[in-house]
Image: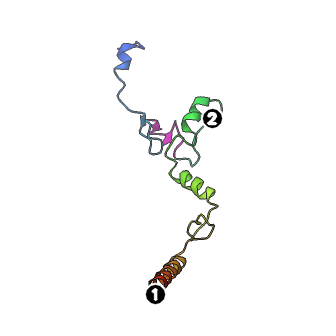
Amino acid sequence: LDMTKGTTSFGKRKNKTHTLCRRCGRSSFHIQKSLCAQCGYPFAKTRHYNWSEKGRRRKATGTGRMSHLKDVHRRFKNGFREFTAARTKAGKIATKASNVEKKEKRAKKVAAAARN
């Protein structure tokens, strides 16, 4: 019969309580509770507390890829324009039609110069 709390008791630890979390990737997902101790998965809102300043810093916006927010920032600079081309230095919107007109004008000038 074992009555100690130390060394021999530690040898009996073989069951895992936590496994990898799908969302944060840490080994903090409690198997029986089906809850992540780190990020709070499967709840929609990520777990964070104001008393943990470092913890908030680690999870803050900008610490990851920001694949969507980078795109939003770029579109914001351009005024969220859609279905148009970027403006030229002169301030006109460059379109295929205007490029065709320019080519035609150049061709006429070349033809006029060749005649003279």
Camera-side residue of 13 and 105: 105
Work out whether mark 2 precedes mark 1 in sequence or the reverse, and give the earlier one: 2
Write the residue at 43% across / 35% down. 27
Secondary structure under the numbered disc 2 in the rendered image: loop
Q: Residue at x 34, y 28 (%)?
A: 14
> What residue lies at 51% left-to-right and 76% top-to-bottom?
99
Q: Is residue 41 at least partly visible in the picture?
A: yes
The part of the image, by quadrant, that contains residue 54 is: top right
Residue 81, horizontal then vertical, whole percent: 61, 65
Region of the chain picked out in magenta, as a range: 27-41
Tell me whether circle 2 and circle 1 mark residues in contact (CB < 8 Å). Answer: no
Residue 115, label in figure:
1
Check disc 2 and report the residue beneath it: 49
Q: Type of residue at label 2?
A: Tyr
Please say whether residue 31 is one of the residues in the magenta stretch: yes
Residue 37 within the magenta-colored segment of the rendering: yes
Front residue of 88 and 48: 88
Dominant secondary structure (helix, strand or loop) of the stretch shown in magenta: loop
